[in-house]
């Protein structure tokens, strides 16, 4: 990739997209592509909609968000369907400030940044194209030039509704520069850019005493008063507040509830009436999506204050809870690590998953029903199949606590712990145990963790550790078997042949001699015993499996190694039981003989080639599992 060439290409594209012409020419564009005149809310909605969605587990997953935000499908679907969509249709919600409410590091800023970056790109496409009165600091909508009494007719002819009044500045320019000839007013295509302050604004509160309302609504430019003679001459005013600059696009209000009231009142009138007051001018029309964010505590104290009632009714609150899905949490860490300075450190397989287990456990609430524990709940939420439960149970569990996900450990904490481990120890390879240890140490330094909570969290760390022990054992045992999947499949096929013959009171045929033989009772029992099936229960178990197979066959599905959880477990255990002694001796001996050494090297090589370890992490894993098996 030649970077200079790319820069040149980019410049050329930007040049090609540019357009300017008279208002009369602009009307031609509106006639052909009426969407260029859509409202800010509608543009945002269409941007999200145009990116498309997929349906995953019956839920919509909007592609616009799905590369960056994981596990928030339900919250995002609600946001799109209850806010953006009706707002785009000019329903009343667009007159509300959108307030994203959620716990720290839950992705609120990421969400807003996505919208901003998305709009920057979208306005460079045909579908998202947008035009403004040339030279206007607020990139005013050219259609504001059309006088009010003609707007109904305009709507009939063009199908485009016009809202808002021509700003004082453009009113004056129309008279002075164009002699009142609307059709001659110059219009240009604009491209949103936060850096250039076009269509995207950000406001974050600082010290209330020193912060000036001018940051929001612009200010008088005293140096020009002499030239223009009066403070109320719009040319003597700098329309460079965030609300001015965000016109037509999106305005992010960071930490809105920390803000001084006087700032909020401007927002009130802007959202409600679509205009705000600046300087000594008539109200200035603006069309922008206002999005703010806050956390729950702040929000609660805000609504409990009677003084805020008027504002409150003009806010629409959208909860953005933490992700509650294990696999998605893992993806969040992967993403954050990729973006960090520690991206080149080797992270042993399962490390992030085990860290994520801890995190998710801290976010889940104890199930009310007695037949399910937190670990199972975590699995179910992640879409794993858990014997005895189905998707209705998952929905029920979710209904138990509608506000789940508003507390617990945040992803940034985990990433900080991982980075600090890496940096402090100057190691180039970390594993699950390193991370769990670091998470544990970090609890003492975490500002918002009480003693009681700490105890609870320590317990979650040991739960995650137990899960890891199982994973580690399985991993090593798998690596000991040459071609694990193959062996498991062969063993299962063999078992099923025997079960079938047993249930049908039939005989099997010996593959070598062709002789008829009885089902191999010893083999079947050796597998069934692995999961505690008694002599009395064996018949029922075998019949149940046959029923499952025929149910699969009826639906045209293949019954395989993963189709029956308990059977899979039994097969796995049987394979491992046969191996256990070998694994135990090989992994724990201090002075391996030649044979053992060869095996260890073989296993390490397999862990590296097939399972994603490096030599450090593979050897650490073997050692750890050796110590586990010898306990
Ligand atoms: N559900 C998620 N999907 C993807 N990334 C996430 C998710 N939740 C958090 N993150 C990541 O965690 C980090 C913190 O997120 P972000 O800054 O957006 O949170 P926030 O809600 O604005 O937090 P704060 O309240 O501290 O401002 C970011 O790197 C973000 O990408
Ligand atoms: Mg934030």
Image (spheres, rainbow, N blue to C red):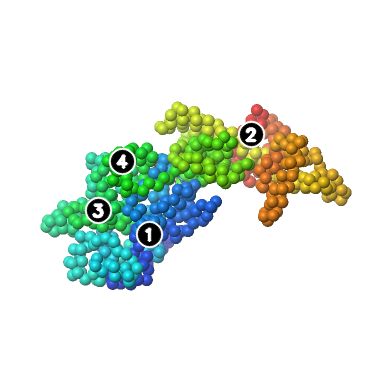
For the residues carrying marks 1 and 2, which lies nearer the camera in this image? 1
Residue in front for this viewpoint, 379 or 1: 379
Q: Are marks 2 and 4 in contact (CB under 8 Å)?
A: no
Q: Where does the image place residue 208, in percent across and percent down from the top left?
A: 25, 41
Q: Are marks 3 and 2 in contact (CB under 8 Å)?
A: no
Q: Where does the image place residue 35, in percent across and percent down from the top left?
A: 37, 65
Secondary structure under tag 2 reads helix
Q: Earlier in the sequence, mark 1 or mark 4?
A: 1
For the residues carrying marks 3 and 1, which lies nearer the camera in this image? 1
Please name the residue shown 17% across and 54% down the image. Answer: 280
Q: Earlier in the sequence, mark 3 or mark 1?
A: 1
Separation of marks 3 and 4 at Cα, in angstroms:
21 Å
Q: Which residue is mark 1?
A: 89
Is ligand 1 less than 8 Å from the beta carbon at label 1?
A: no
Is residue 197 something one can see in this rendering? no
Q: Which residue is mark 2?
A: 625
Secondary structure under tag 4 reads helix
Please name the residue shown 37% across and 59% down the image. Answer: 89
Q: Earlier in the sequence, mark 3 or mark 2?
A: 3
Q: Which residue is mark 4?
A: 258
What label does residue 276 carry, if any?
A: 3
Q: Earlier in the sequence, mark 1 or mark 2?
A: 1
Separation of marks 1 and 4 at Cα, in angstroms:
31 Å
For the residues carrying marks 2 and 4, which lies nearer the camera in this image? 4
Separation of marks 1 and 2 at Cα, in angstroms:
60 Å
């Amino acid at each position: 990739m030649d970077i200079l060439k790319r820069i040149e290409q980019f410049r050329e594209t930007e040049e090609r997209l540019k357009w300017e012409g008279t208002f009369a020419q602009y009307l031609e564009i509106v006639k052909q592509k009426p969407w260029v005149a859509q409202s800010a809310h509608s543009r945002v909605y269409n941007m999200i909609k145009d990116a498309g969605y997929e349906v995953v587990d019956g839920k919509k997953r909007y592609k616009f968000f799905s590369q960056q935000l994981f596990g928030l499908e339900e919250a995002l679907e609600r946001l799109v369907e209850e806010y953006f969509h009706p707002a785009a249709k000019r329903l009343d919600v667009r007159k509300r400030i959108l307030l994203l409410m959620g716990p720290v590091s839950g992705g609120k800023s990421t969400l807003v940044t996505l919208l901003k970056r998305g709009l920057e790109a979208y306005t460079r496409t045909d579908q998202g194209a947008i035009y403004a009165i040339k030279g206007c600091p607020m990139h005013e909508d050219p259609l504001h030039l059309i006088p009010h009494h003609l707007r109904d007719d305009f709507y009939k002819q063009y199908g485009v509704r016009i809202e808002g009044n021509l700003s004082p500045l453009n009113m004056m320019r129309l008279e002075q520069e164009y002699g009142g000839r609307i059709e001659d007013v110059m219009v240009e295509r604009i491209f949103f850019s936060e850096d250039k302050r076009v269509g995207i604004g950000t406001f974050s509160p600082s010290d209330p005493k020193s912060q000036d309302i001018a940051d929001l609504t612009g200010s008088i430019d005293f140096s020009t008063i002499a030239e223009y003679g009066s403070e109320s001459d719009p040319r003597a005013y700098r329309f460079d507040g965030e609300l001015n600059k965000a016109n037509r696009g999106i305005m992010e209000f960071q930490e809105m509830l920390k803000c001084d009231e006087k700032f909020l009142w401007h927002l009130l009138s802007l959202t409600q009436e679509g205009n705000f007051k600046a300087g000594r001018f008539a109200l200035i029309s603006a069309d922008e999506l206002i999005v703010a964010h806050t956390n729950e505590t702040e929000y609660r104290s805000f609504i409990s204050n009677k003084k805020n009632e008027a504002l409150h009714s003009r806010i629409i609150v959208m909860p953005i809870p933490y992700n509650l899905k294990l696999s998605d949490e893992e993806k969040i860490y992967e993403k954050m690590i990729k973006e960090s300075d520690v991206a080149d450190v080797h992270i042993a397989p399962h490390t992030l998953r085990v860290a994520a287990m801890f995190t998710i456990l801290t976010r889940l609430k104890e199930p009310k029903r007695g037949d399910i524990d937190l670990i199972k709940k975590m699995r179910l939420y992640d879409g794993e199949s858990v014997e005895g439960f189905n998707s209705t149970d998952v929905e029920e569990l979710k209904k138990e606590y509608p506000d789940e996900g508003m507390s617990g450990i945040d992803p940034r904490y985990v990433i900080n712990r991982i980075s600090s481990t890496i940096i402090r120890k100057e190691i180039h390879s970390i594993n699950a145990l390193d991370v769990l240890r670091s998470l544990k140490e970090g609890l003492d330094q975490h500002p918002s963790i009480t003693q009681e909570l700490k105890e609870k969290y320590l317990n979650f760390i040991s739960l995650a550790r137990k899960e890891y022990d199982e994973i580690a054992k399985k991993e090593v045992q798998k690596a000991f078997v040459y071609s694990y999947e193959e062996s498991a499949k062969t063993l299962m096929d063999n078992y099923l042949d025997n079960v079938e013959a047993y249930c049908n009171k039939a005989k099997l045929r010996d593959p070598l001699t062709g002789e008829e033989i009885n089902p191999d009772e010893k083999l079947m029992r050796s597998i069934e015993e692995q999961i505690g099936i008694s002599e009395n229960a064996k018949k029922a178990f075998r019949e149940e499996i046959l029923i499952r197979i025929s149910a699969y066959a009826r639906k045209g599905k293949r019954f395989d190694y993963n189709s029956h959880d308990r059977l899979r477990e039994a097969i796995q255990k049987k394979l491992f039981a046969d191996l256990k002694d070998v694994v135990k001796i090989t992994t724990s001996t201090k002075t391996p003989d030649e044979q053992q050494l060869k095996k260890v090297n073989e296993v390490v090589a397999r862990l590296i080639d097939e399972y994603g370890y490096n030599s450090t992490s593979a050897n650490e894993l073997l050692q750890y599992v050796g110590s586990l098996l010898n306990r």
